Amino acid sequence: KFYSHEGVLYSTTTKSLVLYPQGKKSVTYSLPSTAQSIDYYGFYGNKYLENVVLNDNLKSIFADAFLNCTNLKTITIGKSTSYISDAWLNNNPNLNEIIVKNTNASFKSIDGVLFSFDETKLLNYPQNKEGEIYIISDNVNFIGYNAFNNLNYLNSLVLPESIETIDYSAINDTDLTIYVSTLSLPVYAHKFAIKNCKVVYYSNQWKFEGDNPTLKEEE
């Protein structure tokens, strides 16, 4: 039922990556074409991997697949992946970029940020992505679980009026200021959607240029 490929454990029954050893010291790993899923905790705790390239046959990535992969910098998602658990990433402080192949019909990467293919759902903002301010597009109506979590550079996050749903623990960062254009959160915002953040109401008096939001000077 199991076999080893380059020291990594796979299941012949589920065609899944079962366990990537914590002590394996490779910097880059490319998933073999036979693998169709990554099991729960598949890459858990590896502190050496920097770049992971997922194959074009991979369909599913389950929860905590990359939990505590603290040196991970880039992940490339192939064309066939159609399911990614909302908890697939956690404690990846060096993650700069999530890349999705253009031929994938379920997900999309824009400037290293993971979205649904139609760009209405913002799913993951990498912890180590550079930039002090991020303005969410008006196309987005959903912010997923753990989307903005303990970020290294981001100070200011601007939410558009189009946001309808903010999932549990979607925005969790003690140094982050969230700018909202309405005085109330979306109806479908989980009661613990925003944690440890400062929320500021903005109007047309604010301008969002450069690294930080500022008040417009009186004319």
Image (tube, rainbow, N blue to C red):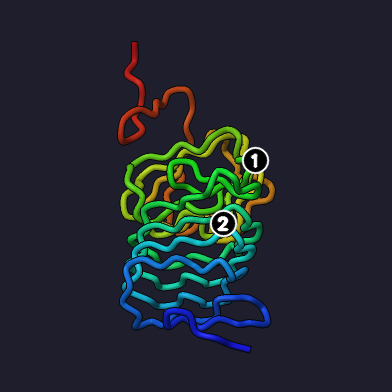
In this view, the residue farthest toward the top is 219
What residue do we see at 35% from left, 47% from top?
154
Determine whether, in the image, residue 46 is placed left or right of residue 116.
left
Residue 118 numbered mark, or none: 1
Crowding near the residue tagged with mark 1, few <14, some 14–19, many ≥20 C-alpha atoms within 10 Å: few
Viewer-proximal residue among 75 and 137: 75
Q: Position of residue 25 (x, y in %)?
A: 31, 77
Looking at the image, residue 195 lies above or below residue 141: below
Which structural element holds mark 2? loop
Amino acid carrying mark 2 in the image: Ala
Q: Which residue is mark 2?
A: 193
What residue do we see at 30% from left, 35% from top?
211
Amino acid carrying mark 1 in the image: Asp
Looking at the image, residue 200 lies above or below residue 24: above
Which structural element holds mark 1? loop
Q: Position of residue 127 (x, y in %)?
A: 39, 56
> Separation of disc 2 and disc 1 at Cα?
23 Å
Crowding near the residue tagged with mark 2, few <14, some 14–19, many ≥20 C-alpha atoms within 10 Å: many
